[in-house]
Amino acid sequence: MIGYDSSDDAAVYKINDDVAIIQTLDFFPPMVEDPFTFGKIAAANALSDVYAMGGEVALALNIVAFPEKLDPGILGEILRGGAEKVREAGGVLAGGHSIHDDSVKYGLSVMGTVHPGRVLANNTPRVGDAMVLTKPLGVGIITTAYKVGEASLEAYELAVESMQSLNKYAARIMKQFKVHACTDITGFGLLGHLREMLRDDISAVINAGQVPYFPQAMDCAREFLITAGGQRNRNFVGKDVRFENVPMAMQEILLDPQTSGGLLIAVSPGDAGLMLEQMRSGGVQAGIIGYITERQDRGIVVGAD
Amino acid sequence: MIVINAAGDACPIPVVKAKRAVRESEADATVRITVDNEIATQNLEKMASEMGLGYSCERESESVYIVSLVKGEGAKSDPSVDASPAAAGSSGTVVVISSNTMGSGDDELGASLMKMFIFTLAELDEAPRAVLFYNAGVRLTTEGSGALEDLARLTERGCAVLSCGACLNFFGLQDKLAVGEVTNMLKIVELQHSAARVLRP
């Protein structure tokens, strides 16, 4: 049903009229010191693609690259973190594959299930839809600044907590509403992933003042603790985005590459308020960040308030 | 001229090094920084633009880029406040207010102390050259603040009342500024750098 042609989060294969399977794979090198935490973050990130497609997690397999000379106890901790998140997702971890390599990498191949009629593609928002983001932005800026001793431990711990939290809870609430499209925010940042949701006939208008982000990331960006990834995303989205009086630091946050970021949901405008309310009362730090319009001169227009 | 080698450094290190050098250097100084990738030059350019520095970049070879950052002349500057000590008039004092409260312990007490501080400041025989407001300090220069009258008195006496633009935006107060002018990081740094003394309540 979904393959290479769109920029979707996972492949979807229809088994019969009642069941389609979602298949996805994601792995990367550590962005945090603690192996148990890294395992949890890498797993939450891989599992997220299933939630972004509207599905439930069924089965996961470990993907591991690990240096021969490193303490195998570290690998044990990474796998323990991954297993904890698969269990929390309600899935079964059924083995995997590991190789020796120069550097550590970890992730999962995940299979999920979804009703074929309820698959949430990326590029199917409708004009008028409200756009909802379900995690604060800025974890890329914070983890990078922390590595060079320029962010506080407190800020770092908030970012880690966000990265290891599953999108399961936001997805569960989302499914009760008229949702037309969904993706999750990872390496291309909010604006990069938003761009993948757009077609030639629609644009997105984003209100920067409503976008949830970590205040500590703003402090860092104001001090020019800006990342290469953010600038790459800026070059990537290029002229397709118009910023209207948005301060540079806020632009950096909107372009910040996220690890295991939140869901970005296009929801019927009449449903957005109640969905947001339910997410917030369920502990999800979501915000209505903008809406979909008829095509304008640019794909994305970002206003300051 | 200050020369920095940041080849081999990943972002944000080149920007952090450049920022420190710029802040520690004299007015009109040039900071030359070598980096090994184009993304780093683009990040330096954004910093230069935010700090009001002159920016130029030369690509010497495949992986050697030399970025020059120029302070003062050649860089854009805000003519509303002259940061040079010579223009200080009768006073070289700059007051920095980075919070809407004074001291820590109790915010209610802190808010009342801050109001009294600004009142007293406006009563001084010699008004300070400038009062800088940043972070939650901008709550004092915007609608609803109890300090507006005293701050207006300060501006009448030639004192610049300056609020950080990024901070106003951050708190959603950009349309609510009720006294003084909006300023930027370059001005905040320069005014403190060139002040005879800096007061922080």
Image (cartoon, coloured by chain):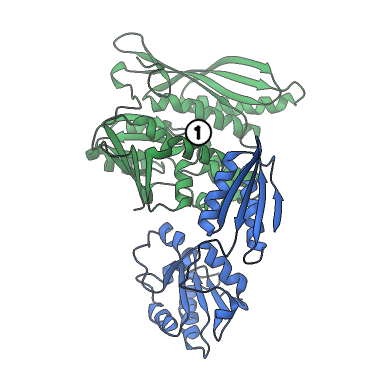
Chain colours: A green, B blue
Identify the residue at image location x=54%, y=61%: B75
Horizontal relation, residue A194 to residue A297: left or right: right
Residue A218, above or below A143: below
Between A138 and B73, the residue placed more toward the observer is: B73
Between A291 and B160, the residue placed more toward the observer is: B160
Residue sticking out furthest to the bottom = B125
Residue sticking out furthest to the right = A69
Relative image position of residue A142 (x, y in whole percent): 56, 45
Relative image position of residue B74 (x, y in whole percent): 55, 61
Q: Amino acid at mark 1?
A: Gly
Residue B187, above or below A31: below
Relative image position of residue B27 (x, y in whole percent): 62, 67
Identify the residue at image location x=77%, y=23%: A69
Visible residue check, residue A134? no
Between A144 and A215, the residue placed more toward the observer is: A144
Visible residue check, residue A180? yes
Between B2 and A155, the residue placed more toward the observer is: B2
Relative image position of residue B54 (x, y in whole percent): 56, 57
Identify the residue at image location x=55%, y=79%: B87
Q: Name the residue that disc number 1 marks.
A: A187
Residue A117, above or below B188: above
Is disc 1 surrounded by few (<14), some (14 to 19) or many (20+) residues within 10 Å?
Answer: some
Identify the residue at image location x=38%, y=49%: A208
